[in-house]
Amino acid sequence: MKFVDEAVIQVAAGKGGDGSSSFRREKYVPFGGPDGGDGGDGGSVWLVADSGLNTLVDFRHARHFNAENGQSGRGRQMYGKSGEDIIITVPVGTSIYDDADDRLVGDLTEPDERLCVARGGQGGLGNIHFKSSTNRAPRQTTPGKPGEAVRLRLELKLLADVGLLGLPNAGKSTLISALSAARPRIADYPFTTLYPNLGVVRLGPEESFVIADIPGIIAGAAEGAGLGLQFLRHLERTRLLLHLVDIAPLDGQTPAEQVRELEHEIQRYSEELADKPRWLVLNKADVLSQEQADEIARATLDELGWKKPWFVISAVSGKGLKPLQLAVMQALQELLAAEMPDSEEQDIRFISRD
């Protein structure tokens, strides 16, 4: 199924029913008086986060959603029935924007979380509300108010704890398949990843985290080149980035040059994303001897002046994967503890969102 992470929809809440102008007429009741009931309220439009969905593909064809109108009031003080609300399910991690002014309306980040995006119109008043000592036969009513209508832009930002970042053919898909049960497309040519992949890395019964792989970033991505920039938003919710680099690239670049190239594109995209914790992971060490891999790693770290955590791995052979998993797990626990109040007094265990 093709991954769709953005959609535009038009929603309209229901109109409120009109108030009724009616008078009580019964035998032996000569002065019955007004008895017109109120109109019912219009239905509202709600968005609900559904953990069973993972794309916005359903909105390719269904783009208009209208809630039910409220019914008009009737005589004998009968109030009109309110319109039914309409429920629209979206994936967890969906951000909702007003398409007119790009204003953020809400963010659905938890399963079953609800957001009212268009409120139904209020029902009108019947003439029973306008009787008084000087106006015993009122014919005034008020019409129902129209419901809200808005054009919304939905953006899906995946909920992952760790994001894989790298140039095409860095081995991101191979790594996520080696760490988790995810089975992305893998081939020996660039851009085999066409949409984000999620995998759950399990280290124990209550120790796991979610990792995301996005299409590779290339030079000029900030101007729209390649596929990766379109999906960088999926890394905005992650706590930790793993910058995956080919330790022996075939295009003549050094690993340090590849790191700087990608850093440049990330900074141009978002300073917030550039400031996230980012570790260097030198991949494909299986194509080199241990001495060659160590020499290239040291030269890369010296050239970059790299002071943050780094690893030399092989996603194909599994070399270095266990230390990487354990270090990521520990870092995530520490980051989660720092986000929680009074964390030093709590027994914190990191549990994935799967």
Image: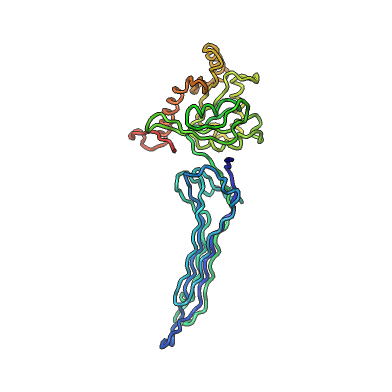
Of 190 and 244, nearer the camera is 190
Q: Quadrant of the N terminus?
A: top right
* Residue 240 drawn at (x, y percent): 49, 31
Residue situated furthest top in the rendering:
291
Q: Quadrant of the C terminus?
A: top left
Q: What colouring style does the render use?
A: rainbow
Q: Residue at x 45, y 48 (%)?
A: 113
Q: Count all numbered tags in the image, as a single digit.
A: 0
* Residue 78 drawn at (x, y percent): 45, 73
Q: Quadrant of residue 156?
A: top right
* Residue 256 drawn at (x, y percent): 59, 20
Q: Is residue 325 above or below residue 148?
A: above
Q: Is residue 330 above or below residue 76?
A: above
Q: Residue at x 54, y 65 (%)?
A: 145
Of 204 and 230, nearer the camera is 204
Residue 101 visible (yes or no): no
Q: Relative to residue 43, is residue 222 drawn left or right? A: right
Q: Is residue 239 above or below residue 125?
A: above
* Residue 71 drawn at (x, y percent): 51, 68
Residue 346 visible (yes or no): yes
